[in-house]
Amino acid sequence: MHIAWLGKKSPFCGNVTYGREVTNALLDRGHRVSFFHFAQEENAPDNWPDFQEVSIPFLYKSQIYTIPTLKSSKILTQSLRELRPDVVHASLTLSPLDFLLPEICEELNLPLVATFHPPFDRRRNLTSGTQHLMYQLYAPFLANYDRIIVFSQIQRDLLAKLGVPADKVAVIPNGVDVEKYSPGTSTLKAEIGARRIFVYQGRVAPEKNVESLLRGWKQADMPEDSKLVIVGNHGTLAASLMPFYGSEHGIIWLGFVADEQRRIDILRGADVFVLPSLVEGLSLSLLEAMSCGLACLATDAGADGEVLEQGAGVILNPQRVSSQLQTLLPLFYDHPEMATLLGQKARRRVLERYTLSRNISRLEDLYTQVAQKETVNLNLKLSNRI
């Protein structure tokens, strides 16, 4: 099957990782992939496969949203007309093109699938309220896609309340390559001179609530041979936090680690993974840590609580992260057997529900369904013209 994938290759974010992992897996299974992305003569990041690429011009691009040029829809339409893929899959980039795609694909008689990524939280706070507006904005347009993929039942229910037909929404969670992300040896503790390592991997952004993690760590007054490792982009927020939460408190800021194997080594060398987010979709960083056998502490923002339910990890209240960590972090330091047991449960949960292989099989089934439906619809159109 030939899939035209519309997504992102930069800047680094969950959407980028999702696109790389899924398209790699589709190619491994013998499918053809044409990758459409907003680009202007940039070098591809590591670990991307070789496939036919179509560059879409843009005016502005960030981790959150993209502004295309006026020519972008014409370039996209013409490229799809020439390539004639079996399915178009848009890993939505929060750009105006997202709203035009259904019309473009209907004109070309191409089945259209979307993955809807925006994070959310069931609680009402300033950040979650902003995300809820995003869902309200997109819902009428998502109803025009042939299928919408979300990562959890919670997201499906939310879109249903906003008027998206339930039969159009498929729950296919993020998946992890459990062979690559697996327990293993690491020299991390020897490198940084630590007995226990706690780690956060992700963007250092307000919605990730990293300051609450840092505050909880500082208040816990952890022993000198325990370290908190922060892996993520050093933006303006990180720069404002680092002077107050530094090496004198046992906090190590590694910045963005581009090499995937190095990120895996960091996870393998750690004891506990902490994700304090205020809003989430379904965190790939959390799933990767679980797959590596780490004990995981995460808020129940988005679908992360669903991932850790029934003892697969510790679920934190997003509004009480600091106070809860002040109690929990010393417990995990003093009782490493707790981390070992929770890490084993986390790994089992991923093997049961969140393997990339199983989810790619579900995606292939969905592609087949929408392609067959489009063929039937096209035949009906042709017969009506005769």
Image (cartoon, rainbow, N blue to C red):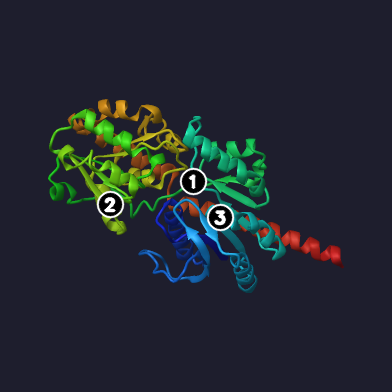
Q: Nearer the viewer, residue 18 or 294?
A: 18
As shown in the figure, which amino acid type bears the numbered disc 3?
A: Ser
The residue type indicated by label 1 comes to: Pro
Q: Secondary structure at mark 2?
A: strand
Mark closer to the chain start, 1 or 2: 1
Which residue was labeled with disc 1? Answer: 173
Q: Which mark is residue 95?
A: 3
Number of numbered discs on residues: 3
Q: Residue at the bottom extreme?
A: 82
In this picture, residue 240 sits left or right of residue 101? left
**Which of the 4 image quadrants contains residue 17?**
bottom left
Q: Is residue 162 left or right of residue 92?
A: right
Q: Tell me where residue 135 appears, x and y as whole percent.
A: 58, 42
Residue at mark 2 = 255
In the image, which is nearer the foreground, mark 3 or mark 1? 3
Outermost residue toward the right? 386
Is the residue marked by circle 1 packed among few (<14), some (14-19), or many (20+) residues within 10 Å?
many
Q: What residue is at 80 percent from the left and 61 percent from the top? A: 380
Dot 2 or dot 3, earlier in sequence: 3
Q: In the rendering, at what x and y percent does residue 77 appear?
A: 64, 67
Q: Quadrant of residue 41?
A: bottom left
| Residue at 49% from the left image edge and 51% from the top image edge | 359
Kindly identify the amino acid type of the residue bearing the numbered disc 2: Gly
Q: Is residue 293 visible?
A: no
Q: CA distance from mark 3 to mark 1?
A: 23 Å
Give the distance between the C-alpha atoms of the residues marked 1 and 2, in whole angstroms. 28 Å
Q: Which mark is residue 219?
A: none
Q: Is residue 196 above or below residue 328?
A: below
Residue 301 percent location from the top left of the image: 44, 35
Q: Nearer the viewer, residue 155 or 380?
A: 155
| Tag 1 secondary structure | loop
- Left or right relative to 257: residue 43: right
